[in-house]
Image: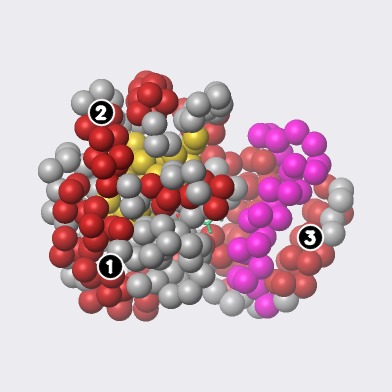
Amino acid sequence: MKKTLYMAPILGVTGSSYRNAYSRFFEGYDCAVLPFIKSSKGRRSTLNDILPERNNARFKLIPQVLDKDPEYFIPVAKAIFDLGYDTLNWNLGCPLPMVRNKGRGSGMLPLLEEITAFLDKVLSKIPNRLSIKVRLGSTDNKALAKLLPRLNNFPLEEIIIHPRTGKQMYKGEVDLDAFQEALSLTKHTIVYSGDIDSVKTLKTLSKRFPRVNRWMIGRSGITDPFLPEEIRHITHYTDREKLDRFLSFHAAVFAGYQKELSGPAHLIGKMKEVWRYWADAFEGGNRLFFKITRTKTVKTYLLTVSDFFATHPNLNI
Ligand SMILES: Cc1cc2nc3c(=O)[nH]c(=O)nc-3n(C[C@H](O)[C@H](O)[C@H](O)COP(=O)(O)O)c2cc1C
């Protein structure tokens, strides 16, 4: 059966400008879960990044909301549905200490009663289909195993599991034994997310978890935008063709941010976020990244990047 490939939400990178540009130059993803929108008290949620007029990616988009309070979650979910998105993802995985310590994101995972009460209230009141993105737990890897049996009777679209704890952030190994245990505890369709960095890694995971057919690619899909095409066996390119495509992709991401943001500091700041990942795609990429971090003007930024590409750098991807 054909695998379903998801672009992972990476806050600060996979916003509309990045997604639109990506979809112009690359294929392979079936859908993208979008970086989280907060719906909490005292904040007016901004739906700017998901406005239909700003989004023309050729894959399905699944917005994501981070909150623990149905009162704030429900109206945002409805507003998102009215913008044309039939599926919504609830973030129960965010590891950021300021989120986790307030019992939101992965910090909510041990709070079984709160989660089931939230779903009881929310599911009957929102028109969207709901999926959930989780980790193994907040500080230890036990919470998800307790939660999953409780979720079996809720009509969820799917559950996306990143098998690390919140405390781990993005470091250390993914815990594949805990993921295996999680699979045995749920009736829901599962999406795997974590450290898929090559065709080989995905093959190994697919072999170990034959029940899983939906795979989410995050950081490595930014470093290597060709990875989904390689997984799909779409084609093989020469390094020269890859470089040219990377250059065009860079120009499109830059143009998108230029339109979206005001002022050189914002624009260069956003490009730096992407180069944090792209640097690993090139020999000498770290030196380039260092130069970019010191860049203050758009002119210098563009010169630095075009000089780098003019040297025909070797690709690491
Ligand atoms: C900088 C950064 C921002 C992220 N933002 C989000 C987010 O907004 N929502 C979410 O559910 N996960 C977020 N994640 C987690 C990723 O979606 C993914 O689950 C995780 O990075 C593991 O996959 P990977 O190893 O393929 O990157 C973020 C990860 C990183 C590194």
Give the alpha-carbon distance from disc 3 to disc 2, as whole Å.
48 Å
The residue wearing badge 1 is 179
Looking at the picture, tell me which residue is in the foreground, 119 or 275.
119
Secondary structure under the numbered disc 3 in the rendered image = helix
Image coordinates of residue 90 in percent, x first then y, are 36, 41
Q: Which residue does the image show at 16% across and 53% down from the upper left? A: 149
The magenta span reads 258-283
**Which of the two discs, 3 and 2, labels the residue nearer the N terminus?**
2
Does residue 163 appear left or right of residue 291 in this picture?
A: left
Q: Height in image: 58 above or below 245?
A: above
Marks 1, 2: nearer the viewer: 2
Residue labelled with disc 2: 121
Q: What kind of residue is marked 1? A: Phe
**Residue type, label 2:** Lys
* Residue type at numbered disc 3: Ile
Label 3 sits on residue:
292
Residue visible at 54% across and 52% down in the picture: 96
Label 1 crowd (10 A; few <14 / some 14-19 / many >=20)? many
| Quarter location, residue 307 | bottom right
